[in-house]
Image: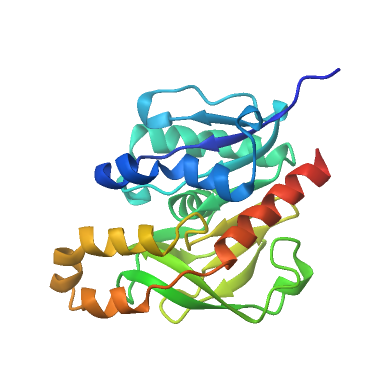
Amino acid sequence: MKPLKKILIVKMGTTLPALAERRGDFDDWIQRLMGATSDRIQVVKPYEKDDLPDPSGLSGIIITGSHDMVTDRKEWSERTGAWLPSAIATGVPLLGICYGHQLIAHVMGGSVGFNPSGSEFGTVDVQLGEHSDQNPLFDGFPPTIRVHVSHRQSVLSLPPKSTLLASSSKDPHQAYAIGENVWGVQFHPEFDADITSAYIKACAEDLSAEGLNPNHLLGTVEDTPYGEHVLRRFGEIVISRS
């Protein structure tokens, strides 16, 4: 019997320490919502100098969010970025979340920077584009979905040959696809209302300095099923192509 190919979670940082103690970390939330068993998951941490594996031996790849910025061009981030084209070339399904979404865009010829519309935190409406119903990650979803967001930087221009899949009022590039095997989502499908609220509270001072009202943002937060639906759907794509 052939060894089971792993789904690789490339962990680009850690969550808030108090939240990690209480709820676990990015990789824990992703694995749980995907419904994947621990024997199917491999986690690497480039920021701890972990080596990135040969992507041809994987069944799927997820690049997580981070508290760092893609524009900082940190060594571990640039090293991960240099690895991404070879991963994409294998045809292995690849999903970038928030920082991961931005890093893929940066590597593939798009641009990333601070969102000119300001930070986007809370639970927001995301409108799916005209191509979303032809894409396996979003096929069958309603025209508008409620999802959780927590970011200051965004994809400012999409990579060449990418397809826009979703937008929000503050971010025109909430989701995109490149070819048949690569997706980026700016929103956090692994977050729930509790996690989103914790981020707003932790960033309240900075949000207030930006002219945003943290209490108002907290009032937008609600549980929504669509993040889990996205991660489950990605898991189904991985299984169908393995």
Would residue 178 appear left or right of 222 to someone viewing this image? right
Q: Nearer the viewer, residue 37 or 74?
A: 37
Is residue 192 in view from this perspective? yes
**Location of the N terminus (image quadrant):** top right
Question: Position of 54 compared to 153: left or right?
Answer: right
**Left/right of residue 186 with respect to residue 240 in the rendered view:** left
Image location of residue 27, percent across then percent down = 48, 40
Farthest right residue in view? 1
Q: Is residue 237 above or below residue 217?
A: above
Q: Residue at x 43, y 30 (%)?
A: 45
Indicate the position of residue 186 as horizontal and vertical percent values.
48, 62
Q: x and y percent of residue 156 in the render?
A: 44, 67
Q: Is residue 160 visible from the viewing direction of this image?
A: no
To which quarter of the image does residue 113 belong? bottom left
Looking at the picture, how far across and down is residue 104, in whole percent?
A: 53, 49
Tell which of 15 and 162 is nearer to you.
15
Query: Residue at 41% across / 40% down in the picture?
Result: 12
Name of the residue lying farthest toward the top: 1
Question: Residue visible at 75% across and 50% down?
Answer: 236
Colour style of the rendered protein structure: rainbow
Q: 225 or 180: nearer the eye?
A: 225
Image point (33%, 38%), residue name: 74
